[in-house]
Image (cartoon, rainbow, N blue to C red):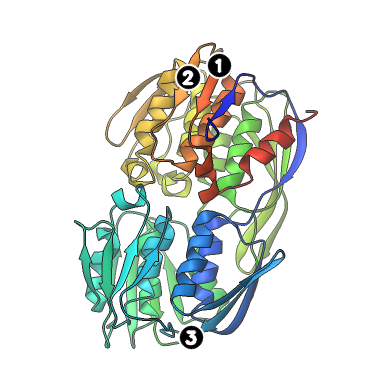
Amino acid sequence: MKNIISINKTIKPFNKTLEIEGDKSISIRWALIASQANGKSTAKNILRSEDVLSTLNCLRKLGIKIKLDKNQCSIYGLGINGFKYKNNIILNAGNSGTLGRLICGLLIHTTKDIKIIGDKSLSKRDFSRVIKPLKKFGAKFISNKNKLPLVIKGTNFPKPITYNEKKGSAQCKTTVMFASLNTSGKTTIKAKKSRDHTELLFSYLNLPIKLKKKKFYDIIEIQGKKKINPFNYKIPSDISSSAFFITLAALSYKSRLIIKNVNINPSRVGIIKILKMMGVKIIYKNIRYYKNEKVADIYVKGSKKLKPINCPTSLNSNAIDEFLLVFLVAAKANGCSSFKNLSELNQKESPRLKWGSRILNSMGIKTITTKDSIKIFGNPNLIVKKKINIKGFLKDHRVFMTSVIAALTFGGKWEIHDKDSIKTSFPSFLEKIKKLNKNS
């Protein structure tokens, strides 16, 4: 029972201020790019989750010296294609699709076999989306039907490519951007809109990147073989982690919450836009820019009346990690909400579209679900009184945390399994829940 959490009471209205750990996407990208710099880079407020620790462990296996202490992480980069390692090493990406896919982009110049493995959940996920473009650079792969484990062997002469990224996947786009650093020439990417942390980091580091923003896609041009100077970074708080508490406050009438120093990159705040459209009061305060990233304090006020939404598909990629939380808000809205073109949700740690529907159904909310859409028939007066058991979700951290938020706001007697799943992205999640619940 140690890995199960029981929740039998809803949270009381609260008025609190929180600080959330560093952004996971930026933490992983910082570490991977720092490994390609020439010299020592440092980061403060790096997220100390299993996904980030897996990234650091993989880099150590590739010959990168890393120091991680209480206050900061230091990485001693060896330059582009500077990795030093033995033949047939194994890199364990754990649960991290970001790490598993992105690190492949840094390995296209290797000439020794490198095996990449992951946990049960990651081993079910599709890697063809990065294998196909990386083969164009000249890399070779042996895989388990385009899934992990896979073996990558690079080429002595990686060549620049032209690539059309149609899925709106920042992981695929970034993998190709990383690979382009190893080429002598210009790589061109036509990418459907998605989070742009890598582009912002490349621009901040003065790498030769040209970006043309169109309405539905971006054109990215990168000139390879450019030296990367070491750099220091104080990583802002994670909007995806903050979203759980934003939703908790939104669903807890009379509650007030401020979350400090959050990354509000426009490619990541789809959930903010959606919740505002549904009637949640959210205000940005103290807006500023830090190394090209937009940062602010987020103020949230609990909402009494929530409106249904026919969610614009243009917001999908900007909220892809937060839709389970959006579904909870839709469950309390007065009417039917509709969400379309969400097949990418089922390419995550678990089939999240199915799990979102399953959680709502267990609460007594009617849904109509297809392979890429869901309709949610909200009930603003819903109070759950029955027992609900959430398990078998492939240890997906977002399913676990979403279930906790549902239990605290809708009531019922919940048993939620695999609480250790939060270690992959948000180890202090339950501690912060307790802080909000204490003397609230």
Instruction: Locate residue 127, reporting x and y percent.
Output: 28, 58
Q: Please state which amino acid type lies under the numbered disc 1.
A: Gly
Query: Gap between marks 1 and 2, in whole Å?
Result: 7 Å
Please tell me whether mark 3 sits on a helix, a strand or a loop. Answer: loop
Q: Badge 1: how crowded within 10 Å, few (<14), some, or many (20+)?
A: many
Q: Badge 2: how crowded within 10 Å, few (<14), some, or many (20+)?
A: some
- The residue labelled by disc 2 is 388
Picture layout, residue 100 above or below residue 362: below
Please tell me whether mark 1 sits on a helix, a strand or a loop. Answer: loop
Please tell me whether mark 2 sits on a helix, a strand or a loop. Answer: strand
Toward the front, the furthest residue is 1
Q: Residue at x 33, y 46 (%)?
A: 347
Q: Quadrant of residue 266?
A: bottom right
- The residue labelled by disc 1 is 412
Q: Is residue 97 left or right of residue 406?
A: left
- The residue labelled by disc 3 is 79
Query: Gap between marks 3 and 1, in whole Å?
Result: 54 Å
Mark 1 vs 2, N-terminal side: 2
